Image: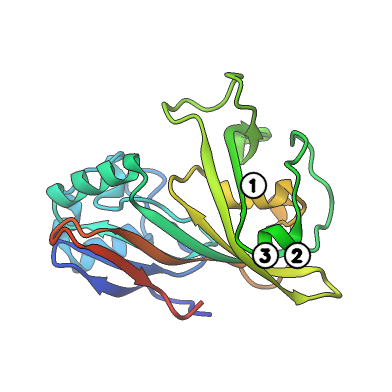
């Protein structure tokens, strides 16, 4: 596992693919907060700060990873790249793939609707997906829960459904009931993978917020591949992180 400092995985001239280590915020939660991935990028590529996406404090970051999640993040260095990639996100052309170590639930969690029918063999063959809306849950809205797709109260967003695909899984510890799970997202909502896996009794190892086993290390979720249409050349691009 790579820890410590961020580093550049790929440069596309007007954009970068960066590695975010665990235990680092992707962007400031408020103006002036330091020590984030966006601060690291801005120090080395000042034009990153001239780009505007959904939030001014994010600079050229196209998306975020949770504090403990590690892996690949797309950073735009020009406004035309940011605008093009925001369109790709809306059109489902910006695809994120993850690996997680999950299972061995510590305790059932409150607030979840009945889970979808889940079969390990089907999931292992890469033929299972979750589809749900999301609602914030608990004191301070620290977590989320799947929300029904019938127009009930969800989040304040024009996008009402999110899909998480399991593209494969394999057992890595029968005694602890732990699995290595590969997943794919076309759109992302806060804690989406963490919540969807916990929904079927496969919380991520170390993710105690969602019922996972306690661990001395940050929880086991890594963004391992980004696939998109290169906004500069127009060709399909897939960037992998092989240190997962």
Q: Position of residue 1 (x, y in %)?
A: 53, 80
| Dot in front, 3 or 1 | 3
The residue depicted at 33 percent of the width and 49 percent of the height is 93
Tell me the CA gap for discs 2 and 3: 25 Å
Q: Position of residue 27 (x, y in %)?
A: 37, 52
**Image position of 49 (left or right of 162):** left
Quarter of the image where one finds residue 12: bottom left
**Label 1 belongs to which residue?**
195
Q: Element type at marker 1?
A: helix
Name the residue nearer the viewer: 85 or 169: 169
Q: Earlier in the sequence, mark 3 or mark 1?
A: 3
**Label 2 belongs to which residue?**
214
| Dot in front, 2 or 1 | 1
Is mark 3 in CB contact (under 8 Å) with mark 1? no
Is mark 2 in CB contact (under 8 Å) with mark 1? no
Is 124 placed above or below 83 here? below
Query: Is any part of residue 191 visible from this angle?
Result: no
**Image position of 177 (left or right of 190):** right
Tell me the CA gap for discs 2 and 1: 17 Å
Q: Position of residue 242 (x, y in %)?
A: 44, 79
Q: Earlier in the sequence, mark 2 or mark 3?
A: 3
Disc 1 crowd, CA 10 A, few/some/many (<14, 14-19, 20+) = many
**Label 3 belongs to which residue?**
124
Q: Element type at marker 3?
A: helix
């Amino acid at each position: 596992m790579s820890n410590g400092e961020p580093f550049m995985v790929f440069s596309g001239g007007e954009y970068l693919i960066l590695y975010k280590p665990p235990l680092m915020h992707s962007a400031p939660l408020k103006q002036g907060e330091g020590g984030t991935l966006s601060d690291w990028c801005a120090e080395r590529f000042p034009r990153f700060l001239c780009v505007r996406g959904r939030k001014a404090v994010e600079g050229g970051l196209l998306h975020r990873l949770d504090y403990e999640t590690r892996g690949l993040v797309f950073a735009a260095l020009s406004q035309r790249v940011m605008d093009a990639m925001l369109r790709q996100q809306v059109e489902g052309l910006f695809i994120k793939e993850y690996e997680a170590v999950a299972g061995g639930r510590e305790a059932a969690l409150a607030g979840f609707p009945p889970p979808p029918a889940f079969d390990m063999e089907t999931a292992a063959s890469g033929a299972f997906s979750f589809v749900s809306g999301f609602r914030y849950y608990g004191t301070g809205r620290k977590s989320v829960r799947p929300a029904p797709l019938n127009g009930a109260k969800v989040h304040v967003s024009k996008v009402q459904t999110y899909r998480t695909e399991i593209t494969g899984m394999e057992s890595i510890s029968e005694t602890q009931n732990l699995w290595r799970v590969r997943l794919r997202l076309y759109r992302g909502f806060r804690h989406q993978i963490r919540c969807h896996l916990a929904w079927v009794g496969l919380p991520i190892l170390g993710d105690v917020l969602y019922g996972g086993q306690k661990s001395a290390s940050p929880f086991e979720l890594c963004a391992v591949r980004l696939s998109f249409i290169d906004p500069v050349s127009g060709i399909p691009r897939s960037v992998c992180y092989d240190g997962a």
